[in-house]
Image: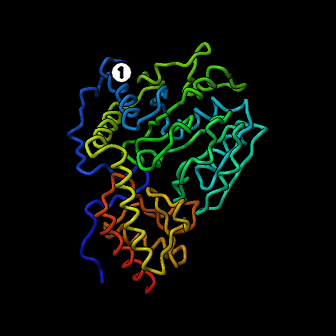
């Protein structure tokens, strides 16, 4: 039978993601709107975005946080183009975004000493092949495959190379061992449900040392430049952004950070994502027609949960459309390069009650499409 209870919030898109529970646009502090981001109030708010991020995440001493252009993509590109070159590079990829970074390094930067280690969708490559002498580039969570790195035991404490981690759908939802990560990037619109166009770049002291001791042989666009006269431009990490940010997006991000603090910090946001995943795991375990793309539970994402169904690809598309038409789930089709299926965002801003309400609708849609 057709379920009678619908999710109160049907937004299960994985980016931009659902706004936090209780979000109210009218509650944002809009004093900075219409003002220069270089005015005192603009610098204050941008600086707070950096410092409050470091505080909530519990970053190690000496780590720097900056707001940079072009979302997580821009933050990753800044790191790749500014830091790579002096050492062998290892690229770990198991889904579309990791593949994108491989393309940048191999076909755009055209580095010679590059080793690419890949796995198919739903699998994780052998992270144990990481070379402590090499610079390592990887995503912590494969947003389009639902596969995460379970730990950082494979990263040597005495490594010589840098670890560059695209953590956009992992930070605030998974335990990240920051002391083993030299570059961490993410965007506001993932786990915190913030607005797009801005990226966050976190650098360890080892990454700063590389920036100040190495100059790439290729020209760097202005929005990538983090040094001047061989020294780090510290202002970037105090809120003096390289290009003009949206102050409305900044105060929206600060609202999300305040919410994280109010509910108990990162431990609470991780717990919310884990609870959401558990609801889906219980549902899948009792049904033979639906499966996790990540069959191995130890590498299963608790944010971008990817599922496959015992249906043809066009039938899966019918399910996605049917759920959208019913107003119970928006934007849950699998990523275009991934195997046909569903992708349900389960990050911290999504409530477990909405996930519970969604699952019977998926079963109803499956039965409806299969019978048609």
Instruction: Please tell me which residue is depicted at 41% across the width and 24% down the height of the picture.
Output: 239
Q: Residues within 10 Å of mark 1 (few under 14, many from 20)?
A: some
Quarter of the N terminus within the rendering: bottom left
> At which x and y percent is residue 325?
34, 69
> At which x and y percent is residue 65?
46, 30
> At which x and y percent is residue 296?
55, 66
- For label 1, the residue is 43
Instruction: Please tell me which residue is depicted at 58% across the width and 50% down the height of the picture.
Output: 97
> At which x and y percent is residue 270?
38, 51
In which image quadrant can residue 250 be found? top left
Q: Nearer the viewer, residue 247 or 302?
A: 302
Q: How many marks?
A: 1
Q: Is residue 169 left or right of residue 100?
A: left
Q: Secondary structure at mark 1?
A: helix
Colouring scheme applied when the structure was drawn: rainbow
Compared to 27, does 247 lie above or below? above
Instruction: Please tell me which residue is depicted at 31% across the width and 41% down the height of the picture.
Output: 256
Q: Nearer the viewer, residue 263 or 37?
A: 263
Q: Is residue 222 left or right of residue 10?
A: right
Q: Seen from this angle, which residue lies furthest bottom?
A: 371
Compared to 124, does 364 lie above or below? below
Q: Is residue 255 left or right of residue 99?
A: left
Q: Seen from this angle, which residue lies furthest front?
A: 158
Instruction: Please tell me which residue is depicted at 48% across the width and 27% down the height of the picture.
Output: 64
Q: Seen from this angle, which residue lies furthest right?
A: 112
């Amino acid at each position: 039978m057709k379920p009678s209870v619908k999710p109160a919030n049907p937004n299960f898109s994985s980016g931009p993601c659902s706004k936090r529970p209780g979000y109210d646009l009218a509650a944002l502090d809009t004093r900075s709107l219409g003002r220069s981001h270089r005015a005192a109030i603009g610098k204050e708010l941008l600086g707070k975005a950096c410092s409050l991020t470091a505080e909530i995440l519990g970053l190690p001493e000496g780590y720097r946080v900056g707001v940079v252009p072009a979302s997580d993509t821009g933050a990753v590109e800044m790191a790749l183009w500014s830091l790579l070159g002096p050492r062998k590079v290892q690229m770990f990829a198991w889904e579309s975004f990791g593949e994108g970074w491989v393309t940048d390094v191999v076909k755009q930067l055209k580095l010679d000493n590059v080793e690419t280690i890949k796995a198919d969708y739903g699998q994780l490559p052998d992270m144990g092949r990481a070379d402590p002498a090499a610079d390592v580039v990887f995503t912590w969570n494969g947003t389009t495959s639902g596969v995460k790195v379970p730990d950082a035991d494979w990263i040597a404490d005495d490594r010589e190379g840098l670890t560059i981690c695209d953590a956009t759908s992992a930070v605030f939802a998974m335990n990240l061992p920051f002391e083993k990560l030299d570059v961490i990037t993410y965007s506001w619109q993932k786990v915190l449900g913030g607005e797009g166009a801005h990226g966050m770049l976190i650098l360890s002291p080892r990454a700063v040392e590389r920036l100040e001791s190495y100059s790439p042989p290729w020209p760097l666009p202005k929005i990538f430049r983090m040094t001047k006269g061989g020294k780090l431009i510290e202002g970037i990490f105090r809120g003096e952004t390289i290009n003009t940010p949206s102050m409305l997006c900044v105060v929206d991000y600060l609202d999300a950070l305040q919410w994280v603090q109010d509910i108990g910090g990162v431990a609470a946001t991780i717990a919310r994502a884990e609870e959401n995943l558990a609801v889906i795991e219980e549902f899948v375990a009792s049904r033979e027609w639906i499966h996790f793309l990540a069959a191995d539970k130890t590498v299963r994402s608790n944010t971008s949960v990817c599922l496959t169904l015992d249906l043809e690809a066009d039938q899966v598309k019918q399910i996605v459309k049917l759920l959208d038409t019913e107003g119970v789930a928006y934007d849950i089709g699998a990523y275009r390069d991934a195997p046909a299926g569903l992708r349900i965002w389960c990050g911290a801003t999504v409530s477990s009650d909405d996930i519970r309400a969604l699952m019977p609708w998926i079963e109803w849609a499956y039965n409806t499409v299969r019978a048609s």
